[in-house]
Amino acid sequence: MLDFNSALEPLLAQDPRFPREAYLFVREALDHTQELLAKRGGKLPRHVSGMELLDGIRDLAIKQFGPMAITVFDEWKIRRCEDFGEIVFNLVENKILSKTDEDSREDFKRGYDFTEAFRRPYLPTPRN
């Protein structure tokens, strides 16, 4: 069985929009999301919805990259939640991840605004 990194080779050759690091981050964010769900008392392993994954991505990005998260994502050509959906569905279509019948790219359109998610937490609070 191929490891995740090796399994990315044909995908990256087929669709070079996003770099390897973006795919590795999404895989790490999936594990991180599972951990977050477990801390909330969920039974694992279980399927992770698009919105749950987006929440895990935001949490992990802030922990790993802090105020540089949006800059890192921009470098990876990820500028909106739908880009994460493209990465996830590239992984699904290449049989690296699986999905349920209810999952779709549309799930990632209901995500968050990158400025709100990744810049606002680091802006100074106004003084009264």
Image (cartoon, grey):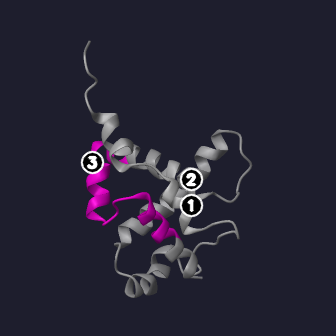
Q: Closest to the observer: 61 or 50?
A: 50
Are the two marked residues, 2 and 1, in contact with CB atoms closer than 8 angstroms? yes
Q: Return the x and y of residue 34 as percentages of the image width and height.
A: 61, 52
Side of 116 where 11 appears, left or right: right
Q: Which residues are magenta?
A: 64-88
Local SS, label 3: helix
Q: Amino acid at mark 2?
A: Met
Residue 42, given in percent of the width and then of the height, sits at 71, 45
Residue tagged 3: 68
Q: Earlier in the sequence, mark 2 or mark 1?
A: 2
Spatial distance from mark 1 to mark 3, Cα to Cα? 26 Å
- The residue to which callout 1 is attached is 107
| Residue sitting at x 45%, y 79% | 8
| Residue 71 on the magenta segment | yes
Residue 106, by quadrant, is bottom right
Neighbour tally class for label 1: few under 14, some 14-19, many 20 plus, Cα within 10 Å: some
Residue 102: which quarter of the image?
A: bottom right
Q: Position of residue 16 (x, y in %)?
A: 34, 80
Predominant secondary structure, magenta span:
helix
Q: Quadrant of the N terminus?
A: bottom right
Compare marks 2 and 3 and give the one earlier in the sequence. 2
